[in-house]
Structure formats: C-alpha cells, structure tokens
Amino acid sequence: MDSEFATIVQRIGDILKNKEKEPLRVLGGYIVGATIVRDDWEEKFQARYPLLNEIAELGADLEVTDDLKRAGEIVKQIQYKFTQLRLPQTDIS
C-alpha cells in the first residue's frame, strides 16, 4: 500500500468513526471529498483500487439520501467495503 493510498484509507476510517456526530449525509460528502475529488484520481488510484471508487459512489449516494433506513444500509455497505479495502492488496497481473 503506497503512502498516498494509506492516507486516503486513514481519512475514510476517521470519517467513519464520526467523532463529531455529524449527520450521515455530511459523512457522505466527506467520503466523496476524501476519495474522488483528487487531480490524480483516475490515473493513479481508480484502476489500482476499484473498492475506493465503490466507496466514493456510496458516499455520493449517502450524501443525497433523505431516507434514514437507506442511509443506514449505505453506511453498512461503506463499512464493509472499507474493511475489504484495508486488507492486504494482491497485485494480479
């Protein structure tokens, strides 16, 4: 795991802890900001870490949902994918 990717993973982990007790839609915006709003996103991370893209998309969904039940489901999906993201990456070439 390179250091830039590790930094993104750490940010997502901090967001998911939600120490400030932010509303779920705010967390979605933070997740989007920590992932896809980067100049180097496509060329450096998207192909190598597809789970990061999935987390970003779920963050975007969370940001716009008003349904609390759906928001809870999205958070669970994000947490699951985050757990997978933290597992050692294998390079299959």
Image (tube, rainbow, N blue to C red):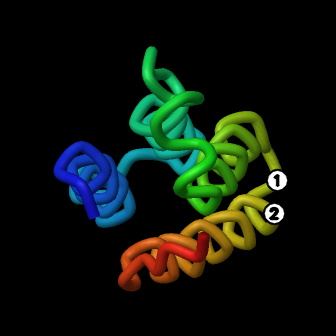
Please name the residue shown 45% across and 15% down the image.
39
Mark 1 sits on what residue? Answer: 67
Query: How would you rate the neighbour count of disc 2 (Cα within 10 Å): few for under 14, some for 14-19, many for 20 or more?
Result: few
Identify the mark at residue 70; answer none if there is no mark. Answer: 2
How many numbered discs sit on the rendered protein?
2
Left or right: 69, with 76 as reference point: right
Contact? badges 2 and 1 (CB < 8 Å): yes
Q: Name the one closer to the observer, 81 or 60.
A: 81
The residue tagged with tag 2: helix, strand or loop?
helix
- Classify 4 as above or below 14: above
Image quadrant for the C terminus?
Answer: bottom right
Q: Out of 15 and 42, give the one closest to the viewer.
A: 42
Above or below, 24 relative to 92: above
Q: Amino acid at mark 1?
A: Asp
Residue pushed farthest left?
3
Q: Horizontal and vertical percent for residue 33?
A: 45, 29
Q: What amino acid is at disc 2?
A: Arg
